[in-house]
Amino acid sequence: MKPNDLPYQPLITDRILEQKRTNIWVPMGFGKTRATLKAVDTLQLVEDSPTLVLAPYRVANSTWPDESQRWDDLSHLTVTPILGTPEERKRALRADTALFSINDENIPWLVEQFAGRPWPFRTVIRDESTRFKGHRLKQGSKRSQAIGKLAHTQIDRWVNLTGTPSPNGLRDLWGQNWFVDQGQRLGRSFDAFSMRWFSTFQESKPTKDGRWTFKVPVTRPLDHAEREIHAILADVCMSLDPKDWFDLKEPVVREVRVDLPPKARQLYRDMEKKMFMELDGIGVEAMNAAGKSIKCLQIASGFAFVDGEGDWREIHNAKLDALESIIEEAAGASVLVAYWFKPSLERLRKAFPQGRVLDKDPQTIRDWNAGLIPLLFAHPMSAGHGLNMAEGGHIIAMYESWWDLETWLQILERIGPVRQAQLGPGKEQVVMIYPIVADRTVDEVVLDRHRTKRSTQDLLMAYMRRNR
């Protein structure tokens, strides 16, 4: 394809070339990959070192290699994925190419391969940098710890790419930015960062019988935290607002409400009472609060596990029926269906045999964008990063609810307004979003979470008080 750079893309390229260590906080669908490839292409003229991209599996396997071959002016820039068996990875490392990509799981393996000898990748691009948000100096994932040992000793250039740098709050920023400045701006350690901009206090919670209260530690940003943190990071961050560059057509969100059949409703009420008791009896952090609700979300979706071995049984088909109506209303247009639980995928495939599953094969994405797949089932953890699916459709059905805000936003933007705008005049379409929501269930609470970004704990507690 002949290059057709949008006016903001050279700004991204220039920033990478001019600043050796930087955060590129650019919205999903803004063409970060192409702009970064342009920078890498230029760097190859002056630097005798290959570039390494750290990315989720699918992005490393298909997004980066496909993007380089998509454009005439970049087709000479081969991207070699370091994937597969150990032998296949070793063979990939021997390739004479300027750019390599590797999935997160294989980062420790790659670092180990060069133990005791020079690290060859002087430029590292961390695609979807929120994957390193949990990095700490003495803890965190093995992946970030492994590459962290080299980040400021053997790596000259480090580029963080993401469209959602702090999906769950300001505390997500420290781990990512450490790879840029080794804690120079936000604090040498996460503890120092927390002490400066956050307050931890004891919040009173009543016991379930209401006779006394107990204290729960709660951490919240100070009033001045957001303003100061953004100001301090300004010189190492680049951000762009889509509204400055596109005449965006707002998505049309149409909630599809379903009611649980009587037997399913009773089962849901029993499970909800148990959840309320557990929430009442202990102080819970957001993750734990969300965990208490999972079984309720599963029943709202239409199934329930019956043992700890993974066996499950169907409870109702209300959401399957609703999805059938959405597909019929689409009148032949392709529909992307987001699911969360494995049993739901089994049920979807059985109810809609014409559907395909978004797997690791890059050809599946190509077939979707070519209009060859009328119904595609996608898990947000597989489809949420780096994929452009706008050519294949503009309708997405959120079959069930899940708490994680980042993956919710990411999968929406695979076909979202920015992606649609990039198709060019006359080609873009208004995005249709259909959240399928079980009435009077935790589905409603999750949807409020995504609309308002309120904490999981606060929303669940409010829901519990309201329902009582």
Image (cartoon, rainbow, N blue to C red):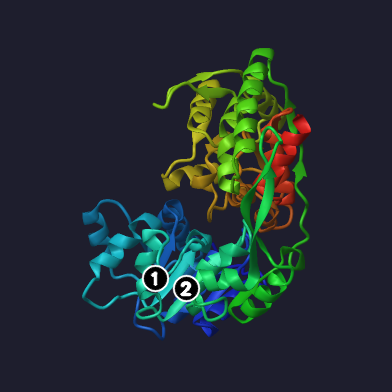
Q: Position of residue 381 (x, y in %)?
A: 51, 46
Q: For residue 28, what is the image quadrant?
A: bottom right
Could you tell me the amino acid type at mark 1? Gly
Element on which disc 1 rests: helix
Q: Residue at x 47, y 69 (%)?
A: 74
Residue 342 in view in this figure: yes
Could you tell me the amino acid type at mark 2? Phe
> Residue placed farthest to the front in the image?
211
Q: Is residue 113 left or right of residue 246?
A: left
Q: Position of residue 462 (x, y in %)?
A: 74, 40
Residue 300 vertical position relative to residue 232 in the rendered view, above or below: above
Element on which disc 2 rests: helix
Which residue is label 1 attached to?
148
Which residue is label 2 attached to?
179
Q: Position of residue 225 (x, y in %)?
A: 69, 71
Query: Disc 2 to disc 1, how far (Cα)?
Result: 7 Å
Residue 135 vertical position relative to residue 57 in the rendered view, above or below: below
Q: Quadrant of the C terminus?
A: top right
